[in-house]
Image (cartoon, helix red, strand yellow):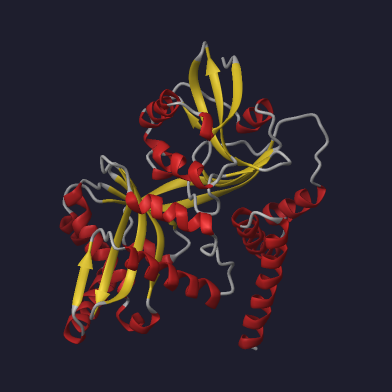
Amino acid sequence: MIHAYRLRPASELRPRDWQGIQAMRLDNPAYASPFFDPDYLRAVAAVQPGLAIGFAEHGGEMRAAWPVQRRANGWCRAPAAPFTDWDGPILAPDVSIEPSHMLRELGLAGYSGNNLVTPVTLDHAHLNTTRNALSDLGTDGAAFLRQQASRHPRQFKKMRRLERRLHDAHSVRFTLHSTSPADLAALIALKRRQLRATGRHDVLSRTWVHRLLKQLHAGSPDGRFGALFSTLHLDGRLAAAEFNLRSADRVHGWLTAFDPEFGQYSPGHVLMQHMFAAMPGIGVRQYDAGSLEHGYKRFYANDVVIGHSATIDALTDRPRSRPLAQIIRHLEYSGPAMVRSMVARSRRRFDQICATERSPIDRARSVGASLCRLANLRQGLL
């Protein structure tokens, strides 16, 4: 039984509080993702002052911890949304808490989660199940690639042909972890160009995002946590890069981009194969590639991890104060298939803007710019 709930600013936590979160996390492999690592949460807290941790305690002992980015109206998102790909409450192994109940006890209105580990009931949440690609590399990256090649022979035969062409035409340099600030700047430039070309909001434009990436790039002093920044250069030029997040033996695929001028060689795939061959050599055993909605990920996945994309209302008798939001959620989760898809895409775009832009003026400006980009793209397709 839980006796006490407390919501505390992350900036006020003491070392023993972070150690308690880490102890609960290490007791359950479901929280192996780097996004649950206290070092990640501390890095976020340094650039986003609104980060808080909701605690559930029994007899003075920590039994659950829920990192949340709190808004003035009591509604919450994941820390550093939209960049955090796994989120939700971290529970001790013998604890079961309904998230909507925990939100109420913490005095919060609700939570929008991207990929919750903790299962929630449909009674108080709008819920979609997510399927995420996991590569269990073991201790031998070359053996892992041979195994995947036997499952997808046509894809790997194609990649062998493309890599031969690549080496015939260019000088190729692979780096498992680049410490170069210039490489990071080049990746950000490529990613921002990709976002603009597809009409999506430029989530990499904000100062706090750049500060977060630089902190993660520096890593932790013991090397246990931080960015694993893998690059592929052709003739000295960045052709593909993955700025991934590492915690112990788990790596999460995060910010990826490639130079379209080298697109004929599929440099992103070439980079991934080099990474998978090399990562076990530095102690990485698992690579989480995220949602399987991107078809290419299946070629490198040998396991699937289930998550829960959910919007959770606090379990309360008070009338809900967000009627428009309730209507939008109903359409997204319960409407006809075509409507669900359209509303989900629009809601995700708006959520990205609200999460990355801090002031109402910046949010309004970004919404207007996003609508203009989509209109221009649509005109270009007609």
> In this rendering, would 317 be left or right of 116?
right
Q: Residue at x 65, y 82 (%)?
A: 376
- Residue 235, relative to residue 275: is it above or below? below
| Residue 157 seen | yes
Q: Quadrant of residue 6?
A: top right
- Residue 79, relative to residue 52: is it above or below? below
Q: Position of residue 360 (x, y in %)?
A: 72, 57
Q: Position of residue 366 (x, y in %)?
A: 66, 66
> In this rendering, would 330 be left or right of 32?
right
265 vs 231, nearest the viewer = 231
Report the quarter where the C terminus lies: bottom right
Q: Determine the residue located farthest toward the top in the rendered image.
A: 59
- Residue 131, relative to residue 297: is it above or below? above
174 vs 345, nearest the viewer = 174
Q: Quadrant of residue 266?
A: bottom left
> In this rendering, would 294 be left or right of 337?
left
- Residue 119, relative to residue 350: is it above or below? above
